[in-house]
Amino acid sequence: MKPIWIVDDDQSIRFVLEKALLREELPTRSFTNAREVLAALDSANDDQGPQILVSDIRMPGGSGLDLLNKVKEKHPGLPVIIMTAFSDLDSAVSAFQGGAFEYLPKPFDLPKAIELIRRAVEESQREEVAEERMNGAPEMLGQAPAMQDVFRAIGRLSQSNVTVMITGESGTGKELVARALHKHSPRANGPFVAINTAAIPKDLLESELFGHERGAFTGAQTMRRGRFEQAEGGTLFLDEIGDMPFDLQTRLLRVLSDGHFYRVGGHSAVKANVRVIAATHQDLEQRVKEGVFREDLFHRLNVIRLRLPALRERREDIPMLARHFLQQSAKQLGVEPKRISDAALARLTSFAFPGNVRQLENVCHWLTVMAPAQSIEPKDLPPEVAAAIPVAVPATRPAEAAPAEAAVASPMPAVTAAAAAGNWESGLEAEAMELLAAGRHDVWEALTKRFESRLILTALANTRGRRIEAAQKLGIGRNTITRKIQELGLE
């Protein structure tokens, strides 16, 4: 673990913090002035730099505020805690505009100081993990047309600061899209701050978003910056915005309208230079009709809407995603990555995945731990996946119970029990008997379309979307596969 850097000209302060942090098994490195810190930062590599920086505000040879500004220029993601005497409180508050994580008033209570430092360390480690994931792996994967539309939209929005609303089911990757929008925006050098409005109790959410002044309520012993201030100059991602309490929606609308807000218990307006990206799995138009979501806030957030497809709408991406997650899980656990057979991939591809990409990732992590051999077969899949594979409905079912047209609407037919066992001809026969019994007169066309669609999509998944290679493997011409993709609506 990287050390915590302590900067103070008072030897007793340095000594007390060093000993207390040592007891907590947190390494430290101490400095007496800002010049020493800046020189050490210039010569340190990534592994030698600080985890967090704890600095006094008044020191000979340069103030803590000047140090904060210079550190943030070079290391914008480094949490900085400013120590100050009560007489310096105004200066400390102004430091928040420069990006300070928190302030520590002197004389401080040592356990509370250690608790604050630990919180900063946790925040730093979370940011490191998020940054490592963003830099070390593809941001998003997908060859399906629906995902290509999402990628194109991110590209078009890359130089924009416009507010974006991301919709989609839980687990489709809404935060990944928000991070990609931030990374490719003019605000990429600023912070990305995410908050799940559904995960925070209503009584605490206002303080989380807007911060609070000291003494604003019982337990508010220090002034605290909210997420809007933490995201200054960057992007604030409001996840599950549909669950935001109605009274807080008014405050959010005010920020989006005039760019100012007040901390809880505060009397001075704080300017917010933040791009807002919101996300929800809910139907906000319906929430507006029900009177639980403000219509004016909906229109303010809904400048650009980006819908993420469910995984069942992009099944051709499942093989590629599964292999990626198996590699990722193996790397995290320090083991050899497992291979997955075509039969197991076919079983995964036929699963509905109500939890979407997140559920697929969890399944792959489970397989990395629980599958007994290096090659994953259908029998190794989690019970809930194997048990949930759809089976053919008996041909004796009354036609009016479920119109056959519903089955034809999707290019991905349900996998029958016979097909799952490898006898797909019997499954095809049962399906044909069902359609004939229903009085259909387009059975040939309906089943041929579904057969061709499945063949082409499977071949494209196998070749990662390369059409010419897919055509070669299917034994058809490239013009034929292009024409079929257009005719079958697979673009």
Image (tube, helix red, strand yellow):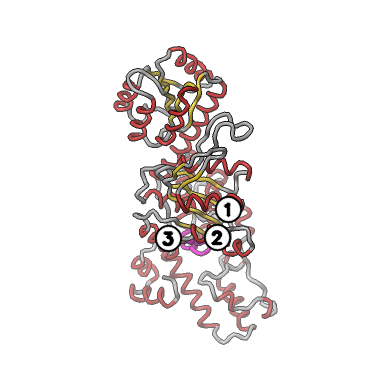
Question: Residue under circle 3?
Answer: 150
Check disc 1 and report its element: helix, strand or loop: loop
* Looking at the image, residue 459 lies above or below residue 379: below
**Which residue occupies the foreground of this view, 175 or 66?**
66
**Which residue occupies the foreground of this view, 298 or 271?**
271
User: Pointers 1 and 3 in contact (CB under 8 A)?
Assistant: no
Question: Residue under circle 1?
Answer: 381
**Which residue occupies the foreground of this view, 364 or 293?**
293
Q: First in sequence: mark 1 or mark 3?
A: 3
User: Pointers 1 and 2 in contact (CB under 8 A)?
Assistant: yes
Q: How many marks?
A: 3
Q: First in sequence: mark 1 or mark 2?
A: 2
Task: Residue 303: name its quadrant.
Answer: bottom left
Marks 1 and 3, Cα distance to the nearest angstrom?
30 Å
Question: Residue under circle 2?
Answer: 347
Q: First in sequence: mark 2 or mark 3?
A: 3
Which amino acid lies under the numbered mark 3 shown in the image of this protein? Answer: Val
Image x and y of residue 31, in percent:
38, 18
Q: Is residue 191 left or right of residue 443?
A: left
Task: Residue 415: name its quadrant.
Answer: bottom right
